[in-house]
Structures are given as structure tokens and as C-alpha cells.
Image: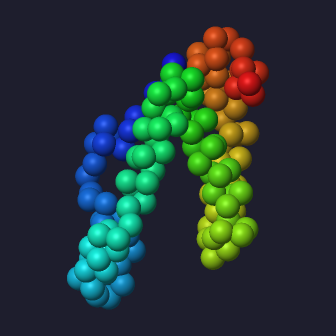
Amino acid sequence: MGEATTPDERPTETSEHDKLPFGADKQATLDLIAKVDLLVASPEKRALRIWETIFKPRADEFSTWDLACFCAETLGLLSGAEFPHLQEDIKKLLLLIYATHYKNFEVIADADRMNYNGNPNDVHK
């Protein structure tokens, strides 16, 4: 069974805006965020919409590691054409994901056995 939670089920110690790297003028950045949030959904709201539509209905089929791999790989696929300015950071994220996967394969294999009825190859279906 997957243990993934929605963003609003996780304890939060900071607001969404506290996650942003503010420059010298924090208030100007907050004002910009408020204006943009009136025009388009925030990254958090966009992620929650996808969570609610795709992952939550089938959360018992995915581990949190599956979700982390999906997110990182999706960013990797999009980084070339869509977000070239993020390529270097996404490469670092992918390196962390792969290093974690292969250095901690025993933990991941144990979770797969629990999540995929004893057959880790079911992850590929």
C-alpha cells in the first residue's frame, strides 16, 4: 500500500511563500506573487490538481518512491524544450534520485514487495 499523502495532509511549518528565495526586497516579491496568483494557479495548486486527478484515486498502487521517480523523470523529460533554464538543477535532482535508488535498493525492494504483492516487477505494468 502506498504511503503518499497530499500536500495539505503533511504538517507544514512554513507558508508557500516562505519556500521562495527572496531577493533584497521581500515585500516586492510577495506583491508580485499576489498579482500572479490572481492570474494563474500557483505551483502548489497545480500539483494538488494533478495529485487529486491522477494519483489520489490510485494511491494504493504507488509508493512514495514511485511518485518521487515520476516527478523527477517528468521534469527531466520537460527540461530540454520547456524549461531549459532548469536543466542543470534537474540533472542534479535526477542524479540524487538515481544515487538514492541504487544505494538504497534493499529498502526500495522491501517497499516494492509490500506495494506490489511480493512481485517488484509489477511496478512495470
Q: Residue furthest top?
A: 117
Residue at the bottom extreme?
24
Outermost residue toward the front in this view = 39
**Residue 84 falls in image quadrant:** bottom right
Q: Is 82 positioned to the left or the right of 17 in the image? A: right
What quarter of the picture does the C terminus occupy? top right
* Residue 113 spot, x, y in % from top left: 65, 16
Say if residue 98 shows up in the picture.
Answer: yes
Q: Residue at x 28, y 48 (%)?
A: 12
The residue lying toward the viewer, choosing from 71 and 23, is 71
Give me the residue at 67% from left, 11% from top: 118
- Residue 7 drawn at (x, y percent): 36, 44
Spot occupied by residue 60 in the image (x, y as percentages of width and height) = 51, 22
Horizontally, residue 38 falls left or right of residue 45, namely left
Placement of 116 over or under 40, stated as above or below = above
- Number of numbered callouts drawn: 0
Which x, y percent locates residue 72? 63, 51
Q: Residue drawn 52% across and 37% down? A: 54
